[in-house]
Amino acid sequence: MRILGIETSCDETGVAIFDDEQGLLSHELYSQVKLHADYGGVVPELASRDHVKKTIPLIKEALKKAGLTPADLDGVAYTAGPGLVGALLVGATIGRSLAYSWGLPAVAVHHMEGHLLAPMLEDNAPDFPFVALLVSGGHTMMVEVQGIGEYQILGESVDDAAGEAFDKTAKLMGLDYPGGPLLSKLAEKGTKGRFKFPRPMTDRPGLDFSFSGLKTFAANTIRANDDDEQTRADIAFAFQEAVVDTLAIKCKRALKQTGLKRLVIAGGVSANSYLRQELGSLMTKLNGEVFYPRTEFCTDNGAMIAYAGMQRLKNQELMDLSVKAYPRWPIDQLKPLNKQILK
Ligand code: KG4
Ligand code: ZN
């Protein structure tokens, strides 16, 4: 079976074709980063308009690269939420309409389930169950995963998401949007120990996160110090170290609480090499294993949507003819897969 996946929930247009026997056949991505850079963040209306321009050409390109025509497909999957409503509606409208005109079933995919399942596209895919740390620009969540659709949220951010904290702090330091990767690059030249940032919400039990205080701490530190390049790098280092350390403390806690030995990290911030390194050594210490997607599938992409869509298609979770988008859609509302159908 083959499925076309379409992702338009934020500022990336992603398209991919996934085959349940051969794996990923093609994937195309267009990032709107330059479009939003002047505004220092995503402008929803501009994002929607750009998805309108890019989605169909990318679908044509993905079909061409896979050497397929629409007649070779068995379904069309698109991100239906959570995300920016206008951006979601572009993918949902195009996906639903193409499915109708091609006589195929349409599948609505949950964006965060897409992220969570992205490591399944790798050779070294995790077995269930596992603990998943989802760290993106819009969400930070710790989830106990017993199987596809069997998600128990163990904790989440009470304010900013981890990626959002990276971006806001980067902006304070004068870095372009999205600042996460740029801040991380700057931190490579930083000196450990010069600044010490707090580890929010680690001194009390529980698995929730709070990152907005770190941004304020960063603002105060920037104000109180010289603006030379080394100081900026040292501040970036201390900020990144605090976020990563906080995430690692919570991962350790979640693994202890669930008794699980496998950890999955996914979402844009899972591309962060310091986070990968620190969680790697944590899992070695705990005699467990850490899994993450290849870097290009950490951030938004069509491949993860095609993969998640295939699981839901096989489970017969098909959309009616209306075009629907769900800007807010809690991940624990998803249905467990019917294991008898899937085998
Ligand atoms: O998953 P994603 O592409 O979009 C959402 O679903 O939100 O995540 C984007 C986020 C941005 O906040 C970006 O700054 C952050 O992921 N990010 C990083 C890195 N690469 C992307 N943050 C820290 N270090 C990175 N290397
Ligand atoms: Zn995302």
Image: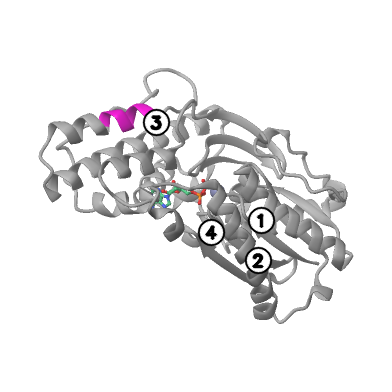
Q: Quadrant of the N terminus?
A: bottom right
Q: Residue at x 53, y 65 (%)?
A: 30
Going by the numbered disc 2, the residue's amino acid type is Ala
Going by the numbered disc 3, the residue's amino acid type is Phe
Which residue is nearer to you in this view: 230 or 47?
47
Say which residue label 1 marks.
305
Say which residue label 4 marks.
297
> Residue 125 falls in which quadrant of the image?
bottom right
User: Circle 3 — which element?
Assistant: loop
Q: Nearer the N terminus, badge 2 or badge 1? A: 2
Q: Nearer the N terminus, badge 3 or badge 4? A: 3
Side of 135 where 101 appears, left or right: right
Q: Nearer the N terminus, badge 4 or badge 1? A: 4
> Gap between marks 3 and 1, in whole Å?
28 Å
Q: Is residue 216 magenta?
A: yes
What's the mark number on residue 211?
Answer: 3
User: Circle 2 — which element?
Assistant: strand
Q: Nearer the N terminus, badge 4 or badge 2? A: 2
Which residue is nearer to you in this view: 132 or 185?
185
Marks 4 and 2: which is nearer the front? 2
User: Circle 4 — which element?
Assistant: helix
Mark 3 vs ligand 1: CB under 8 Å?
A: no
Q: Is residue 262 magenta?
A: no
Going by the numbered disc 1, the residue's amino acid type is Ile
Side of 97 where 296 appears, left or right: left
Residue 20 higher or lower than 214, as above or below? below
Which residue is nearer to you in this view: 60 or 27?
60
- x and y percentages locating residue 245 in the rendered image: 34, 36
Proximity of marks 2 and 1: CB atoms separated by less than 8 Å: yes
